[in-house]
């Protein structure tokens, strides 16, 4: 009898689920993946690895509301985001999703501080001085974005995303421009953020070491997501 109860007990309760990808299929010139499923829970980090061209960034674009898949659903807050009205999709992207891509969309004609202010205005949150110190960019706030190094720009874009207090972080090679030590600080900051804020993170990376620091690791290979951890 006990066995039956165990079998019926869900591994994760619905209220812990942040995002679900169901039966995703996508292709451009060639098929990238077919019938992929993925679930992200609160406080969880997921890494996606795979060879160049396997479709990792495409998958992240689909998960993060930027690209409609050929087939399949992305369920967030019990709704398929790609079936939502355009305005609703934009609101989810703007308010709940924190998208960290290498081509960080900073406003280049403005100062670092102006860029953070935009996030505070949109979200109603204030700038987290501690976070800026941690990321070692607290001393560049008055500088123009164009005067910052690539790595400083990357950390500024991460600070801007976190200022929004997103429910889910989507990060594509977020430490690509950074030395090993700084990359580690950034990853630690992201992991702490999701634990402290009941958020989740999906990370695409080439670096196995960073991937293995995540709770789950999947490899995109032969059209499938294989669970490595
Ligand atoms: N918007 C697009 N239009 C047409 N083809 C695309 C588009 N975006 C990606 N592709 C193609 O899809 C394939 C997968 O690209 P993607 O960037 O998802 O791979 P990746 O695994 O992230 O690669 P990398 O590790 O090199 O960043 C590539 O062949 C790429 O040229």
Image (spheres, rainbow, N blue to C red):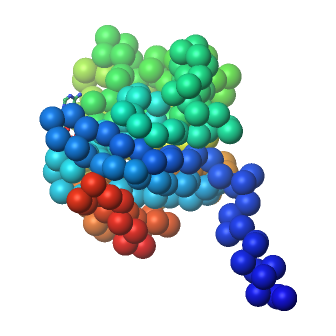
Q: Which residue lies at the image location 25% right of the left edge and 23% below the top edge? A: 147
Task: Please indicate, yes or no, whether residue 113 appears anywhere in the rendered image.
Answer: yes
State which quadrant residue 225 falls in. bottom left
- Taking 217 as reference, is 75 left or right? right
Image quadrant for the N terminus?
bottom right
Q: Quadrant of ligand 1?
A: top left
Answer above or below: position of 120 versus 57.
above
> Is residue 175 visible to the viewer in this orientation of the structure?
no
Which residue is situated farthest in the top direction here? 109
Given residues 150 and 83, the one toward you in this image is 83
Residue occupying image coordinates x 40% and y 24%: 112
Quadrant location of residue 8? bottom right
Which of 48 and 206 lies nearest the eye of the viewer?
Answer: 48
Instruction: Give the image location of residue 168, x and y in percent.
Output: 55, 42
Going 25% across and 21% down the picture, which residue do you hit?
146
* 147 displayed left or right of 96: left
What is the quadrant of the C terminus in the image? Answer: bottom left
Q: Position of residue 178 (x, y in %)?
A: 26, 49
Where does the image place residue 164, in percent across and percent down from the top left? Answer: 58, 31
Relative to 219, say whether 148 is above or below. above
């Amino acid at each position: 009898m006990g066995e039956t109860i165990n079998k019926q007990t869900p591994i994760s309760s619905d209220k812990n689920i942040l995002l679900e990808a169901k039966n995703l299929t996508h292709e451009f010139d060639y098929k990238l993946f077919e019938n992929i499923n993925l679930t992200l829970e609160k406080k969880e980090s997921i890494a996606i690895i795979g060879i160049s061209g396997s479709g990792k960034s495409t998958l992240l674009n689909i998960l993060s509301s930027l690209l409609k898949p050929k087939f399949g659903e992305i369920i967030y807050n019990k709704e398929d985001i790609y079936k939502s009205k355009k305005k609703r999709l934009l609101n989810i992207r703007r308010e709940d999703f924190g998208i960290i891509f290498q081509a960080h969309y900073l406003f280049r004609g403005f100062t670092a501080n102006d860029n953070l202010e935009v996030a505070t205005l949109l979200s109603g949150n204030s700038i987290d001085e501690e976070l800026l110190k941690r990321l070692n960019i607290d001393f560049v706030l008055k500088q123009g974005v164009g005067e910052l190094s690539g790595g400083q720009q990357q950390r500024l874009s991460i600070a801007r995303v976190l200022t929004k207090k997103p429910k889910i972080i989507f990060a594509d090679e977020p430490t690509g421009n950074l030395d090993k030590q700084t990359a580690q600080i950034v990853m630690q900051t992201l992991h702490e953020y999701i634990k402290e804020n009941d958020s989740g993170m999906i990370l695409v990376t080439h670096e196995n070491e960073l991937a293995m620091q995540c709770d789950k690791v999947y490899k995109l290979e032969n059209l499938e997501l294989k669970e490595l951890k």
